[in-house]
Image (cartoon, rainbow, N blue to C red):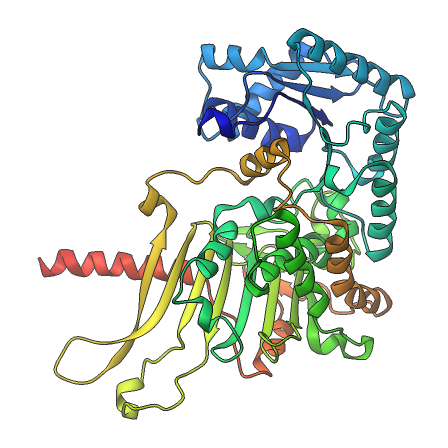
Amino acid sequence: MSRQERPEPTIFTIFGAAGDLAWRKLVPAIYDLFRDGWLPDKFSIMGIGHLHTKKSQYLDHLREGVEQFSRHGKPGKESWENFVSHLDFLEADLEQKQAYQDLSDELERIEKDWGDKAQRVFYLAMPPAMMAPITEGLAKARLNQRREHARIVVEKPFGSDLESARELNRLLGRLFDEKQIFRIDHFLGKETVQNILAFRLANAMFEPIWNRHYIDHVQINVAEKLGVEHRGHYYDKAGALRDMIQNHLLQILCLVAMEAPITFDDNEVRNKKVDVLHAIRDIPPSQVHEYAVRGQYGGGWLQGEHVPGYRQEPNVDPESLTETYAAVKLYVDNWRWQGVPFYLRTGKRLSDRITEVSIQFRPVPHQTFPARALLDRQPNRLIIAIQPEEGILLRFESKQPGPSLHLTPVMMQFFYKEAFREEPVDAYETLLLDIMNGDATLFMRADQAEAAWGVIQPILDVWAEQRPTDFPNYQAGTWGPEQAEVLIAKDGRTWTLPTILQCQEDIAMCRVHSVDDS
């Protein structure tokens, strides 16, 4: 990166600096940016944590996180010492006014030492209950006043329903300008997610067919093998619909469905995303069961190991009715997508870890080939793979070698690691650098956050009133409840299996055949 592209001098303040998010994601990402030369010469990370936390203990804790989660692996002595010289720690009781005055004094001291004004980033890596007191504390200490240089970063969950999101927006909007507020969703920092727009809008062969005339349906799948792990306290109050679909999956849907922006200005891009959310068809309460399915995993076998059910997980109510699986069918009612269903599903303790967007095209209007040539025919499909591998795959029909006419599906594929011969940067690296540069393209605006909640609020309301009687209704290690298969089957469609895993198996088989043939 050139020096001109680096951010201006920056002080990055992390509230909850000794917490899990800072340890696993934020500090390792900032360290990687530092190692790669993306940070300005004048930068400081100010961690704020509980009283009685010693700075030496804090730094040792951070180093353990960097050793485990940095792209660069275990830091060398010189590299770590250089990085640590930019770290500081402030003990504080965040419910007391003095904490924010002490922070203000510390930021003024740093800027005085630098002889330069700095971009001030306030990152709230804290539970939702602390958002209001911290935001108000910053405002009372006048740390929100530099409108062009002070930024506040809010992690998900952004509210727990539509009304709480509106309330949080009112609070933030009263104390900060909208351009100062960065509502972060780490999914939008992933390379393949960002590449959706590049793939669509930079390639003349795809954008003309990106509509209802050529696309049959779209599936967005986020499957996890893990259970709730250490997140039982949070997850049991949230569930799959709030935790994943309201933010991650709807954001991906917006990128797939949005119209081309006139420019790549952050507000222009976000305007197009909001248009998509407003175009999503309302779901009447009486029809929620036709558009949404929920599930909760019971005990089962995963990779030869027996795992407990959700209700047996730590910090989970033994009689919990929280869903760990959700599948939703949505329609975007506009000229481009009218009548094309978007199927979104996510779940924990499923058969595999996979995140991908599958775009299935309509069949050809007239089948020229004889039926015997089409025994293995499958629909054309474009797959945008987000994890565990990152890439784009296109499935199409080809004549199988030989004297007879037989069509078979084949895969054209692109993988980031193979094409660029390097590991994609972590999503948080991209997003943190954008925050420092004041680029809000990948962050949710207030109206976007509320519109996303508006899409799922009817489902939340009905599910709250009609409590499930069949939980748990799928075993760990399966692909979810039977009702989810019914949801898509009644439309004459099926859920796609992880295409990228199938592709990897095909590649392995090809290699075996090549060895045998030689």
In the displayed orientation, state which residue is furthest to the left. Answer: 518
- Residue 66 appears at what percent x and percent y? 53, 24
Q: Position of residue 238 (x, y in %)?
A: 76, 52
Q: Is residue 65 above or below residue 219?
A: above
Image x and y of residue 484, in percent? 62, 72
Residue at the top extreme? 113
Residue at left offset 25%, top offset 60%:
509
Rendered view: 364 above or below 419: below
Q: Residue at x 47, y 14 (%)?
A: 79
Residue toward you, 204 or 482: 204
The residue closer to the viewer here, 256 or 386, is 256
**Residue plotted at (80% across, 63% down):** 457
Residue at the extreme front of the image, as rendered: 262
Residue 479 seen by the camera:
no
Q: Position of residue 479 (x, y in %)?
A: 55, 64
- The residue positioned 60% from the left and 33% from the top of the image is 437
Question: Is 11 situated above or below 469?
Answer: above
Name the quadrant of the C terminus.
Answer: bottom left
Rendering quarter of residue 511: bottom left
Check the image and report above or below for 70 versus 357: above
Instruction: Name the side, left or right, on which 318 lies relative to 224.
Output: right
Tell whether 19 sits left or right of 418: right
Number of labels in the image equals 0
Between residues 382 and 377, which one lies in front from this camera angle?
A: 382
Q: Is residue 367 left or right of residue 514?
A: right
